[in-house]
Image: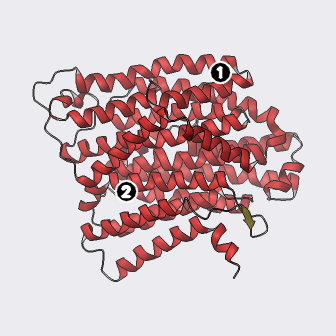
Amino acid sequence: MDMNFFILMKPELLLTGLIFIIMFAKIANLAENNGRFLILVNTLLVLNFVAGFFMNQEGTLFSGMYITSDSMAFEKNILNGGMMLISLMAYDWMMRCKNTPEYYMLLLSAQLGMFFLISSGNFLMFYLAMELATIPLAALSNFDLDRPKSSEAAFKSIMSSAFASAIMLFGLSLMYGTTGTLDFSEMQMLVTGSSLQVLAFIFIFAGIAFKLSLVPFHLWTADVYEGSPVPVTATLAVISKATFIFVFMSTMFTVFANFFMVWDKVVMISIIATITIGNFMAVRQTNLKRVLAFSSIAQMGYLLLGVASTSVQGASSVLYFMLIYVFSSVAIFAVVGLIFYQTGKEDVDDLRGFYKNNKLLSWVMAVALFSLAGIPPTAGFFGKYFLLTSGAAKGDYIVLTVAILNMIVSLYYYLRIVKAMFIDKSENDFERISVSPVVTVSIVICIAGVLLTGMSGEVYEQIKSLFIASN
């Protein structure tokens, strides 16, 4: 077989190899000791992340159904890094988990689907990859088997995923009927803007909007986030969202590039609704995971600003902010997970007096929240600055005004968490949270990423050069 095949599909082949290693470890009863098994898995995830920086090559396979480029390789490695950090973050929880191999097989299967989704050059592969990326995550939502909310989360996740898939499949069938092809490059030339194609696009957009939790397709998000185990919630909020924003961006820039006048209006309306409703609903929440759910909805709205700019600057700002979002969100979920699984507390008011006995974790949480809010000198400030600048370059001043005003609203619920930890008093001192060395490594990497990514302009420039080289 041509060596080119192995080089182009390196990310997918490595992940497939990891899945088989875990499966063989399960069959050979090598996973009975969670400690040794987790060391093996985390080591493999680190090696997989490192391998993502080497031997990347542009090309196509399977008659254009699979495509890859330097920017796609970087997107996949963001997912590799995020999955590695979430795995390290979940170490304490996984040590108590009874089905650790099954958890990782489902998790990596979902990531494999995400990789194929990013590299899809044909809507047939796109749809199959989307199913592979979403169905295992629905099963993972039910991994807290002793919690009724976890079962509820899994049910809502699978039902919303099925509904979104059906809507998208209907749109794809209409698009195929008007163009006679499912290939991205061929379809791009045949999209003329007919009424039937407009209807097809709305269905396809709705399917992706479900996965991104864009308003009004967001109603499943808070319940699923609240009921899922914290590491699964982190995966949904970080890895899944990153994948679908990458896919949405590439689809709009290729298949619907000549359809700009139609999808631009749809995206503009979606940005305003998503940012506004996401932020205002977050203000009303008391549960930490529900606050983060609506926060993630609002963040997806900001990311759409970069997509809508249809420029190299906009695409670069999306990738740059997504990198920051991974660091910030994983750090927050690491702290939330430690608190929940050691104390059972998950409300904002439960954090009163948290700083007294948990100074380091309080500062980790605060820095990560400041980054999501866009407060300097954290990387989140520069990420949102680049997103807003790309929108300004396009001249969407009304949308920009709404986005900036909503940043002020978001300060309320982010700082409310900080206030509860540092300022609010409690009758009983919050107990000291123990942090294992493995989780500490994950937290340190995340906070270093939040601070250093913002202070170094080289990161954004490198990302920009990737898009310039790929176009």
* Quarter-of-image position of residue 42: bottom left
Name the residue at 33% across, 44% down.
444
* Quarter-of-image position of residue 336: top left
Q: Is 343 left or right of 204, judged from the image as shown? A: left
The amino acid type found where label 2 is placed reads: Ser
Image: 32 above or below 199: below
Q: Nearer the viewer, residue 166 or 95?
A: 95
Q: Is 272 left or right of 199, judged from the image as shown? A: left
Name the residue at 40% across, 80% down.
24
Image: 71 above or below 125: above
Q: Position of residue 405 (x, y in %)?
A: 54, 16
User: Circle 1: is it few (<14), some (14-19), or many (20+) Cα within 10 Å?
Assistant: some
Q: Nearer the viewer, residue 42 or 157?
A: 42
Label 2, on which residue? Answer: 87
Q: Position of residue 248 (x, y in %)?
A: 66, 45
Name the residue at 51% across, 37% down.
219
Q: Position of residue 253 (x, y in %)?
A: 75, 43
> Which numbered disc covers residue 446?
none
Helix, strand or loop at disc 2? helix
Label 2 to label 1, Cα distance in Å?
Answer: 37 Å
Label 1, on which residue? Answer: 399
The amino acid type found where label 1 is placed reads: Val
